[in-house]
Amino acid sequence: MEKLLNGLSWRFMGFHPWVPLLGNSLETGISLKGVTDWVPATVPGGVHYDLYRAGYIEHPHHGMNSLKCEWVENRWWLYETTFACPEVEGKQVELVCKGLDYRATIILNDVKLGQHEGMFHPAVFDITSFAIPGETLKLQILFENAPEEMAQIGRTSMTHTQKSRFNYKWDFSTRMVNLGIWDDILLRINEEIRFDELYLTTDVVQNCGTVSGSITLKQNNSGDIGDFGDVKLMVTCKAPGGQVVDTSEHKILAQQIEYSFIINMDNPQLWYPNGYGDQPLYEVELQIVNTDGHVYDIQERSIGIRKLGYTYNVDSPEDALPYTFMINDTKIYIKGVNMTPLDLLYGNVTPTQYEWVIYLMKKANINLVRVWGGGIIEKSLFYDLCDRHGIMIWQEFIQSSSGVDSIPSKLPGFLELLEKSAVVALKERRNHVSLTVWSGGNELTDKDGRPSTYEDENIALLKALVEKYDPTRMFLPTSASGPVEFITLEKGISHDVHGNWKYGGNPGHYELYGNVDHLFHSEFGMDGMSSLRSLRKFMPEPLLTPRSMNHDLVWRHHGEWWDTFDRDQELFGELNEISSFVQASQWIQAEGLRYIVEANRRRKFKNSGSIIWQVNEPWPNVSSTSLLDYYGEQKMVYHWIRKAYAPLHVSMNYQKLNYSIGELFDEDIYVHTHNQAGTVLEVQAEVMDFHGHVYMIEKFKGRSIAEQVLHIGRLSFHVSEYPRELFFVKLKVSSSTGEQGDNLYVFSRSSERIYASALQLMDEPLEIVPAGEWKSAGTFDRDSSDPMLECSYTIRNPGKTAKLHIYPEELSNCYWMEADRSFETLFPGESMIVKVHCRLKQGGGLLTEDRPDTTGDYQLPVIRFSHFGEKGG
């Protein structure tokens, strides 16, 4: 039995280092004081948010205020609470601290229980001798100042902690080093015998599903199991509908602690990744009971029945690793994203935040998330959600590159901590069906800059641990796993690569990504600005004018590496309005990233997938490589990637964005599909100007090819003098299965500032008509109590010119919002129906201010539609 201590009345006080250990001054004998008074504490949480609530620090997100908070990481922090001991007579009681960040001393009733170092393995203490029913216990946890550790730039070889390194400054966040209790604290009340370890694996052979279980028991008294009667292990497996599909009993023998079982079932409901099928979960219940029916311990696990495998890419070099993942003997093309922690203050992240991010992943046709090695091993809820919604997980151990050197640390103390963290992660996460691959860390290399291999001492340690504790899953030495680290046009040497993270210019961007031959692309990105609505939440209003980060420290503080000012002015001309700058920046981010994804996908299973850097950001940036900004809102790029990752998608292979008058436009069109071979596919291609005049229509027809992209035809015409400079290629695809998709490319006749005329496409406003009232759309997840609201709108363009990139915004700021169609273009006379979903904001920590008072009544969502070139926002 477990009893959470999270919800108790916690408080903390700050001290200069070492002061709490002395207590009184040696010179005066007077009690030494804290640097703060007692502060009400959030558990799980961290000291920063609670200090802000108490008025000790200014809001760290505003302007450059985070620089004023750096004293926090240099103090010691004493947490304290009291609780009544529960009725535990005759039982063992353990104190389990899952998330102590980072070095801590644990004290109970003024008795030191021990010291602990490390975020990712629990501190566990037997406190049975303190557990007198009805007695009040005082628990104190004293955190030392944060250890100094590598930020993004440094020497990985000198890394000595298992502290999240992104806290110390990364390109997408400032320095804000978290301290405190970031995960659950609980009492574990044990009877004479209990479960210690559980390992479940599944497989499928010829329509027969198997669940194999390996169990280790732990005995909590000095006698034999036989001393307290006949005891048995009972195993029950229930199908997703609740019906029992298998039960078994196993007699527990004295001195035997390891047991195994196998459950067989015919024609099971199989688990598939998002986009390839459903995610049914079976429930396995394990009980230790005696002949009198007394239950000593019980464990319940949700499992998916699936066969996991890996195979080599088409035309793979002999020395390459098997980068194509297989589920139930089906090759899965990876449509992935990289994820950083959801917040610099990761202890304050709420369950609803996790649900919102997984919801947006699922809506965007994403089927894999890489949990990046510079961040954290996520909380259990995250893995549960991925199981339930078909998001495969690429889990890295906590190691990352450092720029000066990226050699995995061999320091003995570090390897000891790394092993402890890895073993806990392996044992706790291996039962999740979504977990698909392990990796040693991010961008680890040898002294010559080549990606680390299994021969590295550090990597060999992790490989051995994976083989011991989770042998059914692949372990990659690092990401990128080489043999070269970064993308290159050189042929025959690229397996798993990273890069690039900037738009490569016109035509350089297209010439690079359209002609590479890497097998897998596990990290790449494109930078673009956050929405103007988001910028106004953390940037001083006088600074909200177009500018370069080269000339403004506050902008640099919120984005540093991701300045798009020069890039965007080169493509659009002078940008005088902040709204135009934001729209232009997001357009090029979307254009650049879409092209990479489509180019990779056109080489399906010669290239086995894309993992975009990055889905989220843990700190509010003016600009970054994220698809979602810190406040949970989607940039334009999110919606273009949603289309590019769709099960049915049509794309065009082009090598530049501008064509001169009289030049031959001659580009190939491809259809991407999950359908089996032989599905009839039809594509219509239209060449249009911004008035909606159609200058050319071509139709193509073909049949899908198993595990391949279909080259369905070639669009060829000579560019003529259309009105102004822009022309459009609109593609529509339909399948005999009833699926449909569309895509739009914007080209120019100009040789300079090729998209400048897009800023002039303004005439009559859009016509917007709600299609009904707001109504409940249920909840996203089975365990969620927060409802989704739904409303549809009919949008029509009554004007004479195209309305580019039409998108909705939620203006009340009470809701997170998602729309099934966003950043779409309507030509004159065209209309579309947009379905909008909203959910009350329930962010934690500093995001609490960006949500309504949870005790209040809320208005319904307020939706406004805007488009490219429209001022304001």
Image (tube, rainbow, N blue to C red):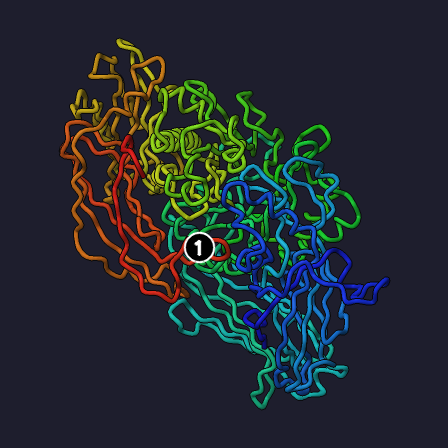
Q: How many marks?
A: 1
- Residue at (71% x, 40% y) in the render: 408
- Residue at (25% x, 15% y) in the render: 717
Quarter of the image for the N terminus: give it.
bottom right
Q: In the drawing, does residue 628 fall left or right of residue 788?
A: right
| Residue 707 picture location, percent across and down | 40, 38
Q: Is residue 623 visible?
A: yes
Quarter of the image for the C terminus: give it.
top left
Which residue is tagged 1? Answer: 849
Q: Is residue 37 above or below residue 489?
A: below
Image quarter of residue 663: top left
Label 1: which secondary element: helix
Q: Is residue 420 above or below residue 648?
A: below
| Residue 96 picture location, percent across and down | 65, 69
- Residue at (49% x, 24% y) in the render: 516
Type of the residue with mark 1: Glu
| Residue 244 picture location, percent across and down | 43, 74
Question: How busy is the neighbourhood of tag 1: few (under 14 within 10 Å), some, or many (20 plus)?
Answer: few
Q: Is residue 236 above or below residue 424?
A: below
Of 563 and 35, the residue lying toward us:
35
Image quarter of residue 290: bottom right
Q: Residue furthest front?
A: 28
